[in-house]
Image (cartoon, grey):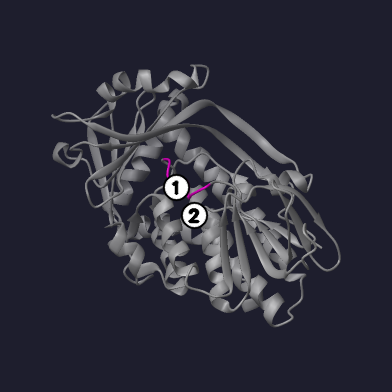
């Protein structure tokens, strides 16, 4: 019973967390016919600068959810990359058209992750079997043989057959399960900024990776009104509360060409390489940043989280609607955890080492990495093979094999 004596309703699935992974998981489940309630602790979808690149390999999943066209119309569609070797001024460029024979979607979409979450939210609000609740902070979790019960901050109990924890790196769900979050925290802090500046006029591509051991940066256009994301690093020992005081001096090194800038928003955040000890405990599963976090170089963290979602929602739908075996969740969990540990995290670390540290000063290693980028520019077959990496981060639902 809930407070006030009302009989407690049993939902099919509770999704905790209102980021892209949570909203897309809820959307997939609800469109399949599963009853879903999404609980978000905040009062709105967080719009601070975070991951902003949706790799080509993710677009099949957006198409299946019915939101690819809207995402493309809302964000920036782009098919080019530039690697700028700062010390030499070399611009290495390649395009995604080498994927023409591998996919119908040989391009990426750039936009804030809050934009995609809001697209999914709008679709969910139209479905009678979906409920979205903001300001619903989960304080405790318990499960039994029939379901999962969460207690909210106001004392209300919400119950479902299954629960998906997609509530970020500081996941309350993961902590309630008593799982460890193994790994380490980097000694640098990332500063993600959204800024208006004429990067294109200075010869930057719509996605430009600036390789430099002091002023490395990821610079991408993220909105049709000319808003760009410029992400750089600083020493994490510097006081976080004064990061904005240091931003103008950083921009003197980071912003190319002529003209000033208009800062729209900025956010500092710690970088981690961490993974939960398990992705499933009974009727509870973890997805996205609640299950794993990585430094954002390469955009592999968000990619892995959405691939978690794409394989999870059909699996849960089959268990709930078709009485498929719950053991399928063990297969899902083992495969997604292996993807992060064996693919996502190692590659993100490799990219960070190259982009922001120039391979730690190892000249031979740096030249080898730059030579690989030059080959991507000049050798279509090699470029295609390298670009297929993000597709290899995908796993299919074990219910659909």
Residue 143 x, y percent position in the rendering: 82, 59
Q: Secondary structure at mark 1?
A: loop
Look at the image and give the residue range highlighted in magenta: 43-48
Find out whether residue 47 is within the magenta segment.
yes
Q: Is residue 283 above or below residue 35?
A: above
Q: Is the magenta region chiefly helix, strand or loop?
A: loop
Question: What residue does disc 2 label?
Answer: 303
| 258 horizontally vs 370: left or right | left
Residue 29 visible in this rendered orientation of the protein: no
381 part of magenta stretch: no
Pick the residue in front: 4 or 85.
4
Is disc 1 surrounded by few (<14), some (14 to 19) or many (20+) residues within 10 Å? some
The residue lying at 14 percent from left, 30 percent from top is 259
Q: Residue at x 52, y 58 (%)?
A: 306
Residue beneath disc 1: 299
Q: Position of residue 369 (x, y in %)?
A: 40, 39
Quadrant holding the C terminus? bottom right
Counting from the top left corner in percent of width and height, residue 98 is at 31, 63
Q: Is residue 279 visible?
A: yes
């Amino acid at each position: 019973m809930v407070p006030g004596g009302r009989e407690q309703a049993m939902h099919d699935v509770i999704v905790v967390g209102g980021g892209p992974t949570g909203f897309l998981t809820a959307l997939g489940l609800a469109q399949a016919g599963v009853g879903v309630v999404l609980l978000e602790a905040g009062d709105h979808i967080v719009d601070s600068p975070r991951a902003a690149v949706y790799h080509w390999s993710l677009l099949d999943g957006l198409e299946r959810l019915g939101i690819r066209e809207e995402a493309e119309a809302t964000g920036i569609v782009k098919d080019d990359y530039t690697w700028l070797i700062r010390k030499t001024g070399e611009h290495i460029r390649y395009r995604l058209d080498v994927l023409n024979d591998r996919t119908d979607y040989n391009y990426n979409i750039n936009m804030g992750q809050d934009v995609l979450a809001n697209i999914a939210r709008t679709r969910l609000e139209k479905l009678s079997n979906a409920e979205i609740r903001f300001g619903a902070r989960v304080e405790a979790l318990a499960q039994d043989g029939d379901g999962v019960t969460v207690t909210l901050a106001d004392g209300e109990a919400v119950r479902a057959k299954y629960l998906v924890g997609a509530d970020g790196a500081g996941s309350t769900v993961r902590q309630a399960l008593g799982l460890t979050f193994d790994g380490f925290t980097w000694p640098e802090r990332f500063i993600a900024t959204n800024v208006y500046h004429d990067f294109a006029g200075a010869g930057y591509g719509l996605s430009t990776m600036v390789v430099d051991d002091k002023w490395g940066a990821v610079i991408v256009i993220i909105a049709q009104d000319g808003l760009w994301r410029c992400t750089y690093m600083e020493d994490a020992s510097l006081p976080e509360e004064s990061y904005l005081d240091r931003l103008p001096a950083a921009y003197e090194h980071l912003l190319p060409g002529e003209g000033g800038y208009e800062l729209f928003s900025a956010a500092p955040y710690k970088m981690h390489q961490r993974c939960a000890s398990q992705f499933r405990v009974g009727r509870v599963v973890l997805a996205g940043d609640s299950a794993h976090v990585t430094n954002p170089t390469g955009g592999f963290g968000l990619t892995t989280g959405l691939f978690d979602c794409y394989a999870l929602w059909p699996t849960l739908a089959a268990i709930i609607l078709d009485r498929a075996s719950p053991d399928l969740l063990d297969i899902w969990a083992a495969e997604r955890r292996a993807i992060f540990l064996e693919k996502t995290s190692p590659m993100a670390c490799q990219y960070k080492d190259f982009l922001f540290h120039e391979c730690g000063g190892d000249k031979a290693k740096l030249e080898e990495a730059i030579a690989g980028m030059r080959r991507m520019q000049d050798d279509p077959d090699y470029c295609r093979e390298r670009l297929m990496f993000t597709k290899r981060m995908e796993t299919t639902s074990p219910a659909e094999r």
